[in-house]
Each structure stands twice: as C-alpha cells, then as structure tokens.
Amino acid sequence: MGGSESGVLNPLNTGYRIYHLIKNGPLDVNGINELSDFIIPPKDVLENKVPFVDWVTSNAGKELKIKIYSLKTRSLKELTIKANEKNSKDGILGGSVRYENWSIAHKKVLHIISVEPKSFAEEKLHLISNEDYIIAVQPIDQQIISLNLEESDPLSILGMIIQNSKGKECNFYIYNKKLGARRENAVIGVDDDFKLGIEGAYGALHEFPFDDIDEDKDNFDNNIVDNPVKMNVIEEKNEGDNVNDSNQENKVKISNVVIEKNDNYDDDKKNEIVEEKKDNIIEEKKIEIVEEKKDNNIEEKKIESVEENNDLKEENDNDEAKKIFDDKDNKNEDNIFNDDEKKIEEENEDEKIKEEGKENEKKEQPKKRKKKKPPQNSWKKNT
C-alpha cells in the first residue's frame, strides 16, 4: 500500500492519500478520486493503537464504511465499499495509499504557471500552464515522495528530488484542475545544466483547486473527524489562474536543480503576507473614508445649493411682492395727484366761469340803465 505511519504527525489531521486506484477494485467507485482524496480510518487506527494494515486485513471480504476527505471540496463524506479477500491479487482495498497530513495538503502542491517550449516539462511531462499541479514524485526504485511535507516547501522538495534522481526513471504524479489525476513517466537528465523548464508557484493563491460541486453531496458529513478543514477558497482559485498575481515571493523559475534552503523563509514570507494584508486593509479603509467624505461633501453641496436656491427664490418673491406693492403705491399716488389736479382744474374752471359771468354782468348793467332813464331832452323839445 505504500507509506509509513509516524507518531510525528497529529493523528487527528492525518489519513491515507489515494495515489492509484485499480480498475474495478473496491476503491474504484463513484465518489473516490486519485490524488485529491484521503481515507480517514477510525480514531484507534489514527492513534496507532491498531496498525492500518491490521485494520484493513480484519475487514477483508466485508462491507466496509470508510470516511473520505476531499481536497476538491474541503469536506468529508462517508462511503461503503466491499473489500477484497486477503488473497486477492489487487489487494484488499485495490489501490495504493500513503500516510499524509490531509489538513495542509491543499497548500503543499506546486502550481505550474508557465512551461518553456520544447523543454523537458513540455515534451516529457506534458505539463499545462495554469492547469497542472505537481503532487508527488516517485523514483523508480523508491517510495512515493510527496510535496506535502511540513518541514519544507514544495519547490525545495522537488528540487532535491530531481538533484538526487539524475539518470533515474521517475513517476510524476500530476493533478489537472479540469481533467483530474494523471501520472507521467520520464528519465531525469544527467547534465549539470539540466532544468525542468517550468515556472512554478505555491502559497495562498496557488492551492489545490477548489470545486464545491460533487455528485455525492448528500453523503457529506463534516462532523466525522475533529478539526475538519473548511476553507472558502473560490476567490483564491480564480486569482491563482492569473500569472501576474500578487504572490510573487513564492513564484520561482526552475532553471536548475540547485536550490538553497532557508529555514526562516516560510516564516519571513508569512510575516510579509500578513503585513501586506494589513497594509491593504488600511489602504482600503483610507479609500472608504475618502469616498465617504466625498459623498458627504457632495451631499452638503446639494443641501447648500437647495437652501441657496430657496433663499434666492424667497428673495425674488419678496422683491416681486415689493415691486407689486410699490407699483400699487405708485398707482395710488398717481391717482391722488391726478385727482388733485382735476380738482384744481375744476376749481379754476369754476373761477373762470364766475369771472366771465361777472364781466358779462358788468357789460349788461350800463345798457339796462340807459334804457330805463327817461329821455329828458325829447320831453323838453316837445314842450
């Protein structure tokens, strides 16, 4: 079955990664996938009270309920399989498994960012940019060496494997986010300037691809083991597709297999990422405050404009009313002046008429007096 059990790993975070399924074997059922799935045995097995091999052997030929942790969904589910008999040529479970820490396995992979044309990676491993992940390497005369190790980063592990495997035939365990698991076989070159011809990256933006679609979702049980990994990494997956992402510190072009190992590298990079996130949060807050101030200023300007318009309108209304009253006063004043002038004219006219009457009377009075006086001269003459 491959792999060995170790007391170093936390038993609550360990299981058996499925590297190879034998066709039509007990594990070759719907809901179990190579490289992305882990068998989670009972707690007694995980705590090494019962060796895994003994647990499997004791269930030979029986229906066996097994718990599966999926890296694709970051979830656990329970399935029932029919184990083979002890003497089966395909083994009791019908597959190859390896003891590993499933709680960090999503981070301990090497994401292929780019592949050089006509390189070893393109012609021998058929790697695809932005789709493939190197999970493990197995020199032909050794056990599987997983990149999922706590003591080092995936890039350093791969470099050391290649450096120690020159001239050897190796199986490369590769996971493609569209097509699933595959295995490529190739002989490592012996030249001093040998290179894979890839640009690889690892870290938060280059984790094992997340997919929340699963045909057996009804069988999910997230309470099967303690401390299940539940991570929403959909956004991280999408950002990982972009070659020019912000995780430049973990992106390294493999031009040769000599890689210096820095024990403080991971801690330094973690601190850098934390500080970068803090800076980003502070910058976002500043932008939010600036935008909020802009919005408040715009709102205040709107209110001031409305109040100014209202004041202007009120002033215009007052001016208009004042104008109306002034016009009315002017009109009344004109009417008063006109009435006074008319009255004066009428009085003058009356005076004129009176004067003319008096003059006419004066003219008529002598005439009347002349008529009434007896003609003395005439009487005297007659006498």
Image: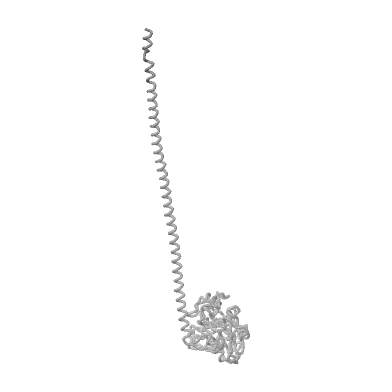
Q: Quadrant of residue 186?
A: bottom right
* Image color mode: one colour
Q: Nearer the viewer, residue 147 or 16?
A: 147
Quadrant in which the N terminus appears? bottom right
Numbered-mark total? 0
The answer to whether one can see residue 70 in this image is: no
Q: Does 175 appear above or below 140?
A: above
Q: Position of residue 282 (x, y in %)?
A: 44, 74
Q: Nearer the viewer, residue 73 or 257?
A: 257
Q: Is residue 205 left or right of residue 300?
A: right
Q: Position of residue 39 (x, y in %)?
A: 54, 83
User: Farthest top residue?
Assistant: 383
Q: Position of residue 201 (x, y in %)?
A: 54, 82
Quadrant in which the C terminus appears? top left
Q: Quadrant of residue 109?
A: bottom right
User: Farthest front residue?
Assistant: 381
The answer to whether one can see residue 229 in this image is: yes
Q: Position of residue 344 (x, y in %)?
A: 38, 34
Q: Is residue 379 left or right of residue 106?
A: left
Q: Nearer the viewer, residue 201 or 92?
A: 201
Q: Nearer the viewer, residue 317 or 192?
A: 317
